[in-house]
Image (tube, rainbow, N blue to C red):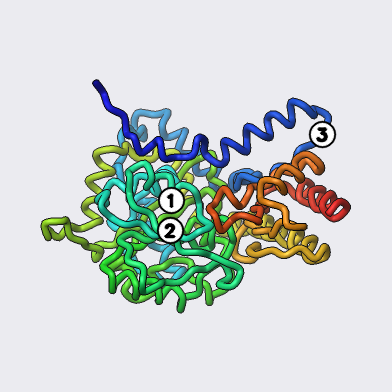
């Protein structure tokens, strides 16, 4: 008899965003005349940058002739893209070797797959509220999970607690869902904690491109000692609108080593390489050429214009909430606004109110953990027209 992984029984019945989609589908079927404005899922709406499209088209043409056709590519990514990423990291003040960078189909995949190289005996430390994937992928492995609370008092940026002993630590900055971003000094405290406890930090930097303040790190590797205790996961989904194109990258430093239960020291870089070459066939050549173009001078200019558009959407939202006297966090270094639910509403009650009364879709904060109760996440990734209209509805009705 084939036995199943019983840890799946410990998961919630459905993934947060699937639950939201089902509610929205029901509402639109019952109210076909209403224009629904979706500000829930963090999907982009602007098209890919012209430089990216040009590179992708050229790569497609290369696939049409025998001389330039590409078959299987390297599982860890083509050298041309990894070299472009090395140069990109230099702009953030970080020096990397090409072999420390692994190209993937997105940060979400790597967030789940990275668990392959860690023992199930590890204790996991996760901030709350948090991106659900961090929790669910470890529940699937049956690991012990501890939580450290993000609250208004600490700006939703929980700091190390010496009384807590953890082996693997998830950090996300700028944060999803709260939009909060750690300073260098705060990250130094986390690196110190990890080194002291022989722990590994899994650092999600998917929203680093939204950071404009030099005082806010775009990479944890600006912190001395981080290469001995951290893995960084990144994505082009928000940096360059690749949500449907799918490309990301993970940095596993050569200096990062840990031991097995019997004391054998292993290189996490070599482990991740072995995992990827066994279970992953690599990102398509056409997509990697498109990604390379993101980091060209022209591509960076165009992508920054795209990011500026979303930042302006966030400003429009923040201005409205400020005018209405609504309390919120985020929006400055992130496309997310973490809005405190008015009148003591629960997260799902406020979600239902916005959907049923204003035809606006948000994401209930309770879906990100216990500390998310009483909050709602809204994204700035909509069109300008939709963002302005949504804020007009809120200004009139709340």
- Disc 3 element: loop
- Disc 1 element: helix
- Whether tag 1 and tag 2 are in contact, CB under 8 A, the answer is yes
- Mark 2, Cα crowd under 10 Å, few <14 / some 14-19 / many 20+, is many
Q: Is residue 78 visible?
A: no
Look at discs 2 and 3 and give the one toward the viewer: 2
Relative height, residue 365 to residue 5 (above, below) = below
Q: Earlier in the sequence, mark 2 or mark 3?
A: 3
The Cα–Cα distance between marks 2 and 3, rounded to whole angstroms, is: 39 Å
Q: Earlier in the sequence, mark 1 or mark 3?
A: 3
Answer left or right for 334 relative to 85: right
Answer left or right for 19 relative to 226: right
- The front one of 272 and 5 is 5
- Mark 3, Cα crowd under 10 Å, few <14 / some 14-19 / many 20+, is few
Relative height, residue 30 to residue 49 (above, below) = above
Task: Specify the label residue 34 is tagged with.
Answer: 3
Q: Quadrant of residue 269?
A: bottom left
Q: Quadrant of residue 300?
A: bottom right
Q: Earlier in the sequence, mark 1 or mark 2?
A: 2
- Whether tag 2 and tag 3 are in contact, CB under 8 A, the answer is no
Quadrant (top left, top right, bottom left, bottom right) of the N terminus:
top left
Residue at 44% across, 55% down: 234
Residue at 36% across, 41% down: 140
Q: Residue beneath label 1, please?
A: 134
């Amino acid at each position: 008899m084939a036995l199943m992984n019983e840890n799946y029984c410990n998961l919630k019945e459905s993934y947060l965003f699937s639950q939201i989609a089902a509610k929205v589908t029901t509402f639109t079927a019952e109210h076909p005349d209403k224009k629904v404005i979706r500000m829930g899922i963090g999907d982009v709406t602007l098209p890919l940058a012209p430089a990216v499209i040009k590179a992708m088209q050229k790569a497609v043409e290369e696939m049409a002739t025998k001389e330039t056709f590409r078959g299987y590519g390297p599982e860890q990514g083509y050298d041309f893209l990894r070299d472009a990423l090395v140069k990109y990291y230099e702009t953030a003040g970080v020096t990397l070797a090409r072999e420390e960078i692994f190209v993937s189909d997105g940060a979400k995949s790597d967030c789940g797959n990275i668990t392959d190289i860690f023992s199930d005996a590890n204790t996991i430390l996760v901030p709350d509220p948090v991106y659900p994937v961090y929790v669910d992928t470890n529940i699937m492995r049956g690991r012990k999970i501890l939580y450290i609370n993000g609250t208004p008092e600490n700006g939703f940026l929980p700091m190390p607690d010496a009384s807590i002993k953890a082996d693997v630590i998830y950090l996300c900055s700028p944060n999803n869902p709260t939009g909060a971003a750690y300073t260098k000094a705060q990250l130094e405290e986390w690196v110190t904690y990890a080194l002291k406890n022989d722990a590994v930090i899994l650092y999600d930097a998917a929203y680093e491109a939204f950071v404009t303040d030099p005082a806010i790190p775009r990479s944890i590797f600006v912190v001395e000692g981080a290469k001995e205790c951290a893995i960084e996961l990144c994505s082009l989904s928000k940096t360059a609108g690749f949500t449907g194109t799918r490309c990301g990258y993970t940095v596993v430093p050569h200096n990062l080593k840990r031991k097995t239960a019997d004391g054998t020291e292993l290189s996490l870089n070599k482990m991740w390489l072995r995992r990827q070459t066994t279970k992953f066939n690599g990102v398509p050549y056409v997509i990697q050429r498109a990604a390379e173009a993101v980091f060209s001078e022209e591509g960076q200019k165009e992508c920054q214009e795209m990011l500026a558009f979303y930042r302006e959407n966030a400003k429009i939202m923040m201005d409205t909430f400020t005018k209405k006297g609504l309390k919120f966090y985020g929006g400055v270094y992130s496309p997310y606004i973490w809005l405190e639910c008015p009148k003591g509403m629960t997260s799902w009650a406020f979600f239902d109110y916005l959907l049923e009364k204003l035809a606006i879709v948000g994401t209930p904060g309770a879906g990100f953990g216990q500390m998310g109760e009483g909050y709602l996440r809204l994204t700035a990734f909509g069109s300008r027209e939709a963002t302005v209209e949504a804020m007009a509805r809120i200004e009139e009705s709340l």
